[in-house]
Image: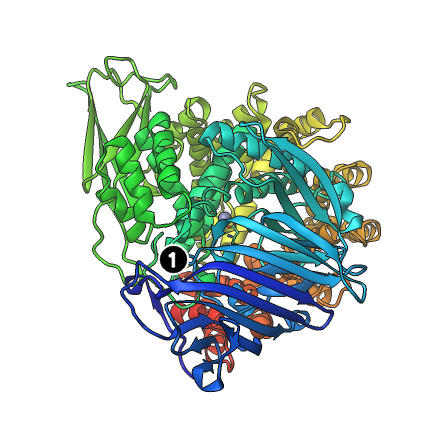
Amino acid sequence: MKDAAPQTVYLKDYKPTAFVIGRTNLTFDLYDDRAVVTANLAISRNSLSKDQTKILTLDGCPGLDLQGLLLNGQPVESSNFLVGSDSLEVFNVPDEFELTTIVNIRPHLNTTMMGLYRSRTMYCTQCEAEGFRDITYYIDRPDMMSEFTTTVIANSTAYPILLSNGNPIERGELDNGRHFVTWHDPFKKPAYLFALVAGALSVVEDNFVTQSGRNVVLQIFVEEKDIDKCGHAMLSLKKSMRWDEERYGREYDLNIFMIVAVDDFNMGAMENKGLNIFNTSAVLVSPEVSTDTAFQRVESIVAHEYFHNWSGNRVTCRDWFQLSLKEGFTVYRDSQFSCDMNSPTVKRVEDVSFLRTHQFAEDGGPMSHPVQPESYMEINNFYTMTIYEKGSELVGMYHTLLGEETFRKASDLYFERHDGQAATVENFVCAMEDASGRDLTQFRLWYQQSGTPILSVQTHYDETRQSYQITFKQNCPDTPGQTNKKPFVIPIRLGVLDHDGMSISLNDAGDSEILLEMTDETLTYTLENIKSKPIPSILRGFSAPVKLNYGPSHEELAVLMANDSDGFNRWDAGQRLTLDACMLATNDIANYCESSLPVSLIEALTKLITDDSLDPAMVSLMLTIPSEALLYEQIDKIDPMTIHHARKLVRSEIAIALASKFQETYHRLKSNEAYTPSAEQIGRRSLKNTALSYLMLLDEPRIDLAWSQFQSSDNMTDKSSALVAMVNCPLALDFATRALASFEDQYRDETLAMNLWLQIQATNTQPGALNRVKALMEHPSFSMTNPNKVRSLIGSFCSANLVNFHNESGLGYSFLREQILQLNQANPQVAARLVAPLTQWKKLAQPHRKLMRGELQIIADAPNLVKDVYEIATKSL
Ligand code: B3K
Ligand code: ZN
């Protein structure tokens, strides 16, 4: 158990600071085994604060070894300051002064990947959320915006490249083989956006001319071996810069924009001003070692971090309760960008699948929290799908309600009003209100109430009156700390089809789609002059983040799937059909009954796969039935084995029923054209590999196709898809073993490809996965200190190999607990992320429930638990 429970921070306690740091001058003297950090801070009273305290309190951490403290150039007497474990207090300070601190820190011993640390041979930083205090004493909060000048000094042979935020203003040689570079960032920023990099890096350089004609130098720094994997990121960056000018009127502001790729990183990337630091997995790609998914991920993360330059950096957050202000908005911006660069429907489907599977689970679980949380123990635990993905949906709803033009006016207003400020969610809503003239009082509930609203639908057709009524009813389940929720504003995009699939016009103007704004608990919509019972297409484009409770017949779903003019709802109708099939199979298996697929489903899928006019990417998505994790969302007492077998049964039956179609499709889409990550090619590869995965489920699986694809393909998408297909096929064991060995042989030196190799084995659903994972932990390609590898092997096993993780022995759970406790001190953030699968214990059937809870309890009782893990474990019990 913890000695004392960590403190909770509350939104209601927000107060401006008593002092502000107008200017921050930093000097980093880097050595192999230490860094000496000198901070010279120009401090004065904060005019926004009434607090007249004479004590200056700076944030710090136990790792700061204070070597010197000067006030206006004079050493501060020992009676005039106090060093606490995570603070420095200076007494009797005047109203305006300069404070200099000199601290020694030990980056080479820093395994948390927060603050200043080493990744392989380089120095790098990660300061968001509260990592700057691990580097030096500071007022480390986002509303403390300061002008930074940073000098980095290091040995010129080991660290020829010395980077920080802003523009370089001076460089030179020093004694003892050392050199320095000074950087100045003219834009005031909070410390969480500070960055520093030092190392022997190679650079890919390009340039971009902004809409106002300024030239910006673009640089991507990587290790020499990766220099050929930067092209896609550079292209994505230039596209993002142009797109943000065109869609949001946002131009880049410094003369230089840098990206650095590091191997050891807790997340995807970080938007530090002018110096983005990226996980290598989010920047480096090449056709031979990276999948299509990796290419698309790079494009979207590069865009996301770049877009933060306005939504996050120029306008930052007042405090961490406003996190979704920058993250939700930026996710929305990057998803719009990806829609514009690729297929918008495919992107929407992917985003909604992710939201429904993961954010809905979070919202229905013990960590459920509003988009604007009211409290936290550890802010790093709140970089969640609710803050990011649900936050993005909220911005999307403004767009839907206000329309394109007004939404753009509102975002312009927001940026203009708050440029250079630390803003709040409320500021954003006000900008939306002021630009549109709408009252968004009720809309604010989306930020305050947690949980996923349920939208129930009932329809009634009156044949004699020829009228059709749709009644919507909303309610939102209780979530931790919140009961009796008020109704939300729910934008419902609606269309109506006749039984032949033709759109019915909904008003005199002949519109086939309308937008309803639901504000009360119920809403009834009536259509007159309807000749026969129609089929509603509800919540088109997933116009609100709600669960739809509506049970159309299979025939109606089949009509929607084949004819709805809204691509998203066509996909969704197909999902509902396959979901129903999986649920039926689950019941049949649980009751030891024979199970078979509804004929309507087979007919619908046959029609789908034989329609050449459709986008292959969409066909592939529609043939991909709901994941096990999504099925978990539909059930109260989850039995993982039954769900796994039911899903497998449905897939096998689809494979049998459509075998010849899959074969034709596979051969039709095989191609020799040179690889590009274009949406068209990605779509074709996706459908081809979906067909292959079905062909591997036949009684006589097409191992020949998989093997030859594995051997002959020149790109990682096809190679890894073939490998996955063989690894998961019980009859292809020998081939899978040979293929895994040959993969290892070929890509031994390609870190990212080897991570994929680990992941493919971790998600092998065949029995014995835990032992395979344990054996792989001894493999030279695995390392417990690299977050990517932990995620690839341990994370994937526990979150994406559910049938094995949930093995009734409970060994999967105890394995996870061991790994969490091992990482607890070394890397609190990675450890805390791993707890997620165990937090869902209440939804599982016995014995899983009891076993999972038992492991959570062991975690909660463990000595020296970091607050990251403590918060999640205790809140989940
Ligand atoms: N803002 C960072 C995330 C920081 C996470 C800190 N635990 C990356 C992003 O969302 O763009
Ligand atoms: Zn972000």
Image coordinates of residue 153 in percent, x first then y, are 70, 62
Image coordinates of residue 125 in percent, x first then y, are 61, 60
The quadrant where residue 540 appears: top left
Residue 586 seen in the current view: no
- Does residue 564 appear to the left or right of 105 in the view shown? left
Front-most of residues 876 and 14: 14
- Does residue 667 appear to the left or right of 17 in the view shown? right
Image vertical order of residue 558 relative to residue 196, above or below: above
Residue at image point 43% right, 61% down: 141
Residue 306 seen in the current view: yes
Front-most of residues 601 and 275: 275
The residue pinned by badge 1 equals 319
Label 1 CA crowd tier, 10 Å (few <14, some 14–19, many 20+)? some
Image vertical order of residue 867 relative to residue 382, above or below: below
Residue at image point 34% right, 34% down: 410
Tell me the amino acid under the disc marked 1. Answer: Asp
Q: Residue furthest bottom?
A: 79
- Does residue 40 appear to the left or right of 139 in the view shown? right
Position of the N terminus, as image quadrant, is bottom left
Q: Residue furthest left?
A: 465
Front-most of residues 647 and 330: 330
- Does residue 28 appear to the left or right of 673 in the view shown? left
Image coordinates of residue 467 in percent, x first then y, are 19, 21
Residue at image point 61% right, 37% down: 237
Q: Ligand 1 near label 1 (Cβ, under 8 Å)?
A: no
Image coordinates of residue 104 in percent, x first then y, are 62, 74
**Element under disc 1:** loop
Q: Residue furthest top?
A: 509
Position of the C terminus, as image quadrant, is bottom left
The quadrant where residue 177 appears: bottom right
